[in-house]
Image (tube, rainbow, N blue to C red):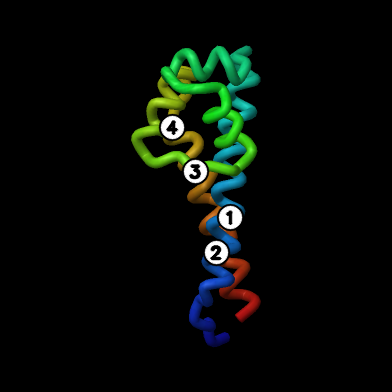
């Protein structure tokens, strides 16, 4: 079966899914660690609205912010990245099957 060229729509859809997965993972980890948005914000020296925007998917983290966020929660950033990589691989497989 011939694979179609990825379109901007397909790539954007995957990016949104992956970004949502990471935001959900961070929110789950924050709650597991017993932090409120405010207590986490204090640990990373930012506002609670920043944490809220990240968790509501209104703002993406850059790599440095992501690592600081994970360090503040005492969680392994590789765990979150692994989940994103798995999602990405699954999405690429599905896109190839549909093409």
Identify which residue is drawn at 45% across, 22% down. 46
Q: Nearer the viewer, mark 4 or mark 3?
A: 3
Q: In which quadrant of the rendered image does the C terminus lie?
A: bottom right
Can you identify the residue that label 2 sits on?
Answer: 12
Q: Say what secondary structure mark 1 lies in.
A: helix
- Against 4, residue 28 (above or below) is above
In the image, 69 versus 45, the foreground residue is 45
In the rendering, which numbered label is found on residue 76?
none
Report x, y in % for residue 51.
55, 28
Q: Are marks 1 and 2 in contact (CB under 8 Å)?
A: yes
* Dots 3, 1 in contact, CB < 8 A: no
Given this view, does label 4 or label 1 mark the residue nearer the observer? Answer: 1
Mark 4–mark 2 distance (CA, rounded to whole Å) = 23 Å
Cβ atoms at labels 4 and 2 below 8 Å apart: no
Residue at mark 1 to residue at mark 2: CA–CA distance: 6 Å
Residue lying furthest left: 64
From the viewer's side, name the closer residue of 94 and 70. Answer: 70
Whether the residues at callouts 4 and 1 have beta carbons within 8 Å, the answer is: no
Image position of 2 with respect to 8: above or below:
below
Q: What residue is pinned by disc 1?
A: 16
Residue pictured at 64% horizontal, 20% vertical: 31
**Who comes first in sequence, dot 4 or dot 3?**
3
Kindly identify which residue carries mark 3: 60
């Amino acid at each position: 079966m011939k694979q179609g060229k990825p379109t901007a729509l397909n790539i954007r859809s995957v990016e949104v899914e992956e970004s949502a997965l990471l935001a959900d993972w961070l929110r789950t980890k924050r709650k597991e660690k017993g932090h409120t948005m405010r207590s986490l914000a204090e640990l990373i020296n930012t506002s609670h609205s920043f944490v809220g925007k990240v968790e509501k998917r209104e703002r993406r983290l850059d790599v440095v912010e992501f690592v600081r966020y994970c360090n503040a929660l005492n969680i392994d950033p590789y765990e979150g990245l692994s989940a994103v990589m798995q999602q990405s691989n699954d999405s690429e497989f599905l896109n190839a099957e549909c093409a």
